[in-house]
Amino acid sequence: MKKKTVAVMMAALMAMGMVSAVNVQAGIEDKTLIVGFDAEYPPYGYMDEDGEYTGFDLELAQAVCDLEGWELEKKPISWDSKDQELDAGSIDCIWNGFTMNGREDDYTFSVPYVDNSQVIVVAEDSGIDKLTDLAGKTVGVQAASAALDLLQSEEEGGQKELADTFGALNEFADYNTAFTELQAGALDALAIDVGVANYQLKSRGEGFKILDETLNTEQYAIGFKKGNDELCDIVNKDLQKLADDGTVAKLAEKYDIADMVTLTGSDDASADDAAADTAEEAE
């Protein structure tokens, strides 16, 4: 009886392991990559004038899927529930201006592909010119964002000491809402990623500025569920291919973040291009 019980338990454990393996490799097994993203986070992920989800990250994800023969499913998520979505398996990765610094133990990350800074945006006529001018002011930030983590961190490089001087630190579900509040005068300042800040300032016209002093610098990467190394490795390989063939650079120019993108072509690719150019000249 014991042997039979042990056999049944072993079979059950093996079945659970097989299910777990399938879940971990979702996006490979069913040929669909489900990308979780913040739908109001331009230029990385947002809805365009035609009602289509687009952005630098989503176009890059599509390019990876094209290489692999996968379908891309773009799944807008609430940013403060991203971990629950990933843990539940409803998305395969978080790919949308996702800061890896300080989160390395919580996810399996791709290679970093963007150098980002956390900055402060204020109205041009606010009289706020440096970080110390924020004392007593109402500052906005996105909920569950890297900027909020930074302003609450007491670790080295954290900015809790600065945040403690604020009159208030208000959290918002998305930066479009926060910018509306800033424009209306309900906020004095906004802590935000520089790429998103540049996009917002460009689209909204004059009236805002970015302080010269930054809060910190960080890197963006794609976040996979911890332990999903196989899917991460495939995407890393494809990212390098896309850097080598110029796709990454082309998208970076399109979304005006060329000075921030860190994915570059490999030496081998550069050598191949040089050889091809020489051959063309010889002809």
Image (cartoon, rainbow, N blue to C red):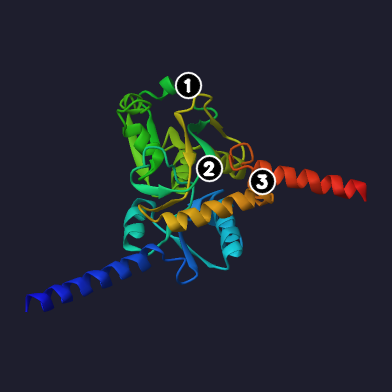
Circle 1 — which element?
loop
> Mark 2 = which residue?
196
Q: Amino acid at mark 1?
A: Lys
Question: For the residues marked 1 and 2, what is the alpha-carbon distance in whole angstroms?
Answer: 20 Å
- Residue denoted by label 3: 249
Q: Which residue is mark 1?
A: 130
Residue depicted at 49% across the width and 68% down the height: 32
Residue 282 placement (x, y as % from top left): 92, 47
Q: Amino acid at mark 3?
A: Ala
In primary-sequence order, the first of circles 1 and 3 is 1
> In what element is the residue under mark 3?
helix
Contact, mark 1 vs mark 2 (Cβ under 8 Å): no
Residue type at tag 2: Val
| Residue 141 location (% of width, % of height) | 40, 40
Which of 188 and 5 lies nearest the eye of the viewer? 5
Q: Residue at x 36, y 54 (%)?
A: 227
